[in-house]
Amino acid sequence: MVKPVILAGGPPKALSSLVPPQRSKHTLRILGKPVLYYPLNAVQSVLRSDTVIVYRYEDVEREALKYTLRPLQAVRQRGEGIEDAILTASEKLNDTDYILLAYGDIVIDKIAIHRLVETHLALEPAATLLVLPPDTRYLYTYGAVETDLDGRAKRVVEKPESMDILEQPFYMLGGFYILPTAIIDYIEKGNSLVDAINKLAETGRVATVHWNGLWIDIGYPADLLEAARQLLDRERGVVIEGKAEIEDTAVIKPPAVIGRHTYIDHHAVIKGPVYIGENAFIGSHSFVRHYSDIEDHVRVGAYTEIKNTVIQPHTLTDSHVYLGDSVIGENTVIGSHVVTLNVLPSQEKPPRLREHLVRPPSSKAKLKLGAIIGHSCRIGAGTILYPNTEIPAGVEIEPGSIISRGKKSGRRS
Amino acid sequence: MCGIIGVVALPGRTPYRPSLMVYRGLLRLEYRGYDSAGVAAVAPGRDKLIVLKGKGKIEELEKKLGFSQIDGFTLIGHTRWATHGVPNDINAHPHTDCTGRIAVVHNGIIQNYRELKESLVKKGHVFRSDTDTEVIPHLVEEFYKTSSSLYEAFRRAISVIEGSYAIAMVSTIEPGKIFFAKKDSPLVIGLADGFNLLASDIPAILEYTRRVIIVHDGEIGYITPDTVYIEKLGAGPVAWEKRVRIVDWSLEDATKGGYPHFMIKEILEQPRALQDTFFGLSRDPAVEEAVKLLLEARRIYITAAGTSFHASLYYSLLTSTLAGIPVIPFIASEYKIYANTAGHRDVLIVVSQSGETIDSLMALRAFRERDAKIIAVSNVIDSAIPRESDVAIYTRAGPEIGVAATKTFTTQTLALSWLAISHAEKTGGLTESEAGELRKILEEAPRQAMVSITNTESYAKQLSEWMATKTNTYYLSRGIGVPVAMEGALKLKEIAYIHAESYPAGESKHGPIALVEPEFPVVFTIPNDEELEKLLLGNIKEMKARGAVIIGVAHEKTILSDQLDIWLKTPTTHWILTPITHTPPMQLLAYYTAVKKGYDPDKPRNLAKTVTVE
């Protein structure tokens, strides 16, 4: 039997300004669902046994219960690292030979998990790892697997400093592993998970499963944009859920999803792919453009333009706001005439940001990223936010401020 | 690789006639092999089994033999990809014992079959085929003489065979059972109401049941319509009830060997295909025979169509370079003009993946009529072209389902490089040690192909988003890189439906550059050869000057790196491996571009895998 263990106790790190206290990054929302939903659903659609979930804060347990397809065994994580998380889960693993260790912050397709499980059952290796073609956006913050010609793992390297230390060919670790429960004893003796996998790899019996479909590790703000983008790319047509109210002069171009009780005012233009959650409000003459993910209870004031931006629940913008390539935390208020600048200077390359390999001759910039605005902030009217500015949680910014990275003006609390 | 399937049912309890279920299962298993197929059935009221089998594709055989029309409730089927013995009606599975009462299908290799066969022949068993598999029914027949049950005889037979196998066996002695054994080849059991199934993979049976048991290595047993018995060889019965899994994914999710398309599966399989081809070549006496013909030749021609022509062109350039001997390459459909020049001291090399390409076959016959000697290079054992040739060299790429050739191109270039080196060694173009060195480099091909794939896949996927918006491209190179560029262009054309033109880069200024405008994609294949790289610099610059976007498929240390807008980085290795290292990134680019545009890369419009009409 293979029993899933979802690890959802990790700290928010680079996402900390977006995650309220006593909450986890795993419950940040993408297209109306917590991040956790995606790996949980993928794993549970393949494996029927009880699912162990390791969490730090109750929000994870609460959300997991809401979306779980199978009985859930939730345990609060003791200690900090991944090894501690595995040891925390071990009390629930006496009844299984194998575990499917899954990171709770990876947006993934269930087909990847099918293939992982099928390969494991068919080949009967000591362990099976999901691997991806190396992508420099993720490789250094993640891990690499050196393999032989048939894809058997030879060595796992965690967070390689450079590609030079790796022996080619290698793949990238995918954050989903089927491992024998026996590795817990090995970890208990003070070895790391990577040591444990490498020990198994020495026997030549660690299989890998190639995956190059949907896979996004949510570790940085840009990952939320990427996840929204890729999930929205799967939408087709226009879905308007019950009791959504759309004024007859509003224009909606597919694909678009509009949630229950959401109101779209006159002359608003929604140009898909766009997601708008439940109980949201889109003001008159607003222009909501491609790859916008507007979560539940968000209010967008009149004459506001939003593009390639993720807005967490209960956030509000006044009128005449421009939000481009930005991520906004929950419960934040953005005053009128706030503008995010989003064209990055050429030397700036925020982590994980999607790169447009070929730039149109008319554009000087390869990369765009607007502002990362934390939860519970108040951005005063008329503020201009330079590209790649991060506003920590709970900050109030005076009206008319100009905020850039390193050079900040205006009052902040 | 082969595929097996079995159905054992109670009358009236299956959704379709059991033989139709077997036939449909075979169609789903076709990706595991399609050179021959067969079905054996226990027919009511008959002492002997019904065995229908033959060479050819399953659908053709169905028309000829009518697999789906067989009566009976215990059936096994097989679809084959020849490894031992050529694909023909006799070597097709199922294989039977002397009495026709026991039939076996097998996926895998029986390593000790020669010894077993010898001892069985001594005991009077009559073998009909050249296959390793046929020893199994005869062994069972032999052991049954001294066993209390057929199962015991089957178990004894399995315990003496060595190798890898997934085996299914039916017999009129115990009509309502399918016996099975598994080691290192996949096998699953499907549980249903009133019938049970087994197969090489889940998709083959998913239409009929979602309850499956994955059979483990070293397990043996049998299924009946309502029971399953599994035991671990030498360790007694297995409690399989706990191992039943409910498969709740759809057939659409599951097909194509676990990949979204066969094409990506086959691109990623190239390292393995190259490895198998390399080992095959290093032991194949046919290469030496071919070299002998080439040495005696007055003129050497090489012909093919499509992708195989690009491999042929590569061979022609390579032989000129290494052996200093001209080779005349021509497109097979243009054979008439070339055949007109051929005579009895000439040699024609015919390259065809399927070995059935009609244009190539016609060229072969035209040359044959003029007494030319023929060397075939093919991926399908004993297909028409190898059969009608004096010497046949085989690539061992395994079955290729995607219409766009991928692994067959890289393995063809490997085989042809091997031939060119062996030839050059004999003409004095290469010393023995130089030839040895180059062969060592060829041995690196599988690993270098894999490095090339892993290094570029993610980048090619990103690039495909832009490529998908384009309608015209150029694929350019010089020298040995030209056929590789041509192959890259063909991939983009045939599956992504983007016009891609390929020509030697020096030709740009003689016309084609007139079409280049800002953002026009130009893909340069840049071999690891400084002289060529220097020549290509000018060609890149003239394109850049007109606003073209330069995509370079180039090794990590290329002197042209600062000229490239997009760099698909291949490993730094000898230029002779250019087709092996530089083609996969272009295959990946074409694949992801097709997917991005919403096309099915496995089934390009207007194209067939094997072209059998002129």
Image (cartoon, coloured by chain):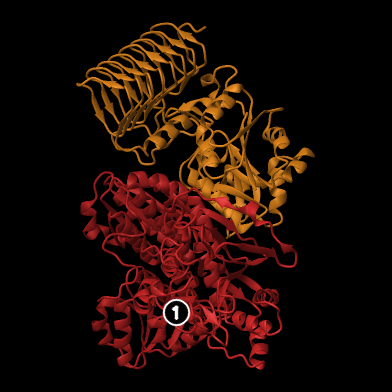
Chain colours: A orange, B red
- In-front residue for pair B337/B94: B94
Q: Position of residue B503 (x, y in %)?
A: 30, 62
Q: Is residue B528 visible?
A: no
Q: Quadrant of the C terminus of chain B?
A: bottom left
Residue A183 falls left or right of residue A215: right
User: What is the quadrant of residue A239 in the picture?
Assistant: top left
Q: Position of residue B113 (x, y in %)?
A: 63, 81
Residue A71 falls left or right of residue A355: right
Q: Is residue A384 above or below residue B451?
A: above
Q: What residue is drawn where x is 27% and y is 81%?
A: B335
Residue A339 falls left or right of residue B160: left
Farthest right residue in view:
A189
User: What is the quadrant of residue A333 in the picture?
Assistant: top left
Q: How many marks?
A: 1
- In-front residue for pair B473/A79: A79
Q: Position of residue B479 (x, y in %)?
A: 38, 66
**Residue placed under numbered mark 1 in the picture:** B53
Q: Is residue A334 above or below residue B451?
A: above
- Label 1: few (<14), some (14–19) or many (≥20) C-alpha neighbours in 10 Å: many
Q: Chain of mark 1?
A: B
- In-front residue for pair B151/B294: B151
Q: Is residue A361 visible?
A: yes
Element at badge 1? strand
User: What is the quadrant of residue A225 in the picture?
Assistant: top left
Q: Position of residue A353 (x, y in %)?
A: 45, 33
Q: Is residue B117 above or below residue A376?
A: below
Q: Amino acid at mark 1?
A: Lys
Q: What residue is drawn where x is 49% and y is 34%?
A: A352
